[in-house]
Image (cartoon, rainbow, N blue to C red):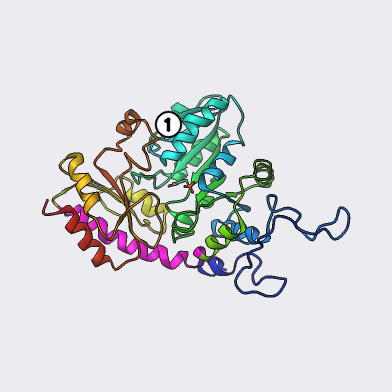
Amino acid sequence: MRFETLAIHAGERPDVAFGAVSVPIYQTSTFVFEDVGKTRGYDYSRTANPTRRVLEDTIAQLEGGKAGFAFATGMAAEATVMHLLKAGDHVICGDDVYGGTYRLFQNVMQDFGLEFTFLRMDNRQAIEEAIRPNSRMLWLETPSNPLLNITDIEMAVDIAEKHNILTVIDNTFATPYSLSPVEYGVDLIVHSTTKYLNGHCDVVGGAVVTTTDELTERVQFLLNAMGTCASPFDCWLVLRGIETLPVRMKQHEENAIAVADYLEGHPAVEKVFYPGLKSHPGHEIARRQMKGFGGMVSFETKGGIEMTKSFLRRIKLFSLAESLGGVASLAEHPATMSHASMPREHREKVGITDQLVRLSVGLENVDDLIEDLGQALGAG
Ligand SMILES: Cc1ncc(COP(=O)(O)O)c(C=O)c1O
């Protein structure tokens, strides 16, 4: 089955019990045993649940991995993956990852004895120099949040394999529709399903896809031991969203290209970050490794923070809100919102300025979106 078909038919569908076409929501904590020591496949919903299983199988198949796991949030998925490591292990991570990822690593996992190096993942020599004898994990996010930096996955995996380091990619921005990390040999894929996979801003969720039996067994163990799993209803919402992922991603990209082109030509805009633009330093790599450039566009306004604030107050169709990947367009200010948990010095070092705005370009008519951006930017 091809991607669009898998998005609708992967996993146990129709339901085996009564043939329901829409995956039933098995809203139950526990399951009756057939006999002492004999289940009908499920015993307790933290360990496994039939609704969750369909979502997990669907995401695993879309990513081309071994197995999938659905979590309560993207952060729950990430926290669980970090428990594959132990005190004394070293992690190399992109320097402009999602602010919550940075916070989890710096302010939580570091206290458990993990070591972290954050660096721009665009330079083979710099990554190689960061490797220590205790390096165990390379954490990638491409396109990155919020600067849309592109990492050459082939290069990163090549380095990691030479040093026997586990590679993890946060594929939230690209989605499996636009990027297939498994094809490049990435070991683990992480998602905030809150974003494009759900697509409607009505759930928070996360996912992990594994590529080996060993990782599958370990992630299943950790999910159950830590209790970080997603609820059946939340799984159902993500499943319903995934059914339209391919058509949504095509339109998100079409709209984002038009928005990025418009912003690049606007006199009140200092700089536009979108991998689909020829001016983007990662454009050629993105063209090579991605099927589409996605729906996220970041830009800096000219004229200092007051101009940025004025833009954010004046937008109407774009809502000023955290999150991304839904059908409705959102705008946010990384310095005070998604990346506020990153210390100012780190933000400044990596280029997340106070003038940076991140747009999640939705599925509205793109002319309406552009008119909204135009009125909010003013004459420049
Ligand atoms: C790239 C990326 N990864 C992970 C997360 C965390 O996901 P969640 O908010 O579902 O916990 C986010 C949230 O914004 C994100 O943008």
Badge 1 element = strand
Residue 256 belongs to magenta span: yes
- Residue 45, position as x, y percentages in the image: 69, 53
- Residue 100, position as x, y percentages in the image: 45, 39
Chief SS of the magenta region: helix
Q: Is residue 377 visible?
A: yes
285 lies left or right of 60: left
Q: Is residue 301 visible?
A: no
- Residue 37, position as x, y percentages in the image: 86, 53
Q: Amino acid at mark 1?
A: Phe
Residue drawn at 24 percent across, 67 percent down: 367
Residue 276 belongs to magenta span: no
Compared to residue 17, the image places residue 317 above or below, namely above
Query: For residue 118, what is the image quadrant?
Result: top left
Q: Which residues are magenta?
A: 241-266
Residue drawn at 88 percent across, 54 percent down: 36
Residue drawn at 33 percent across, 44 percent down: 147
Q: Which residue is mark 1?
A: 118
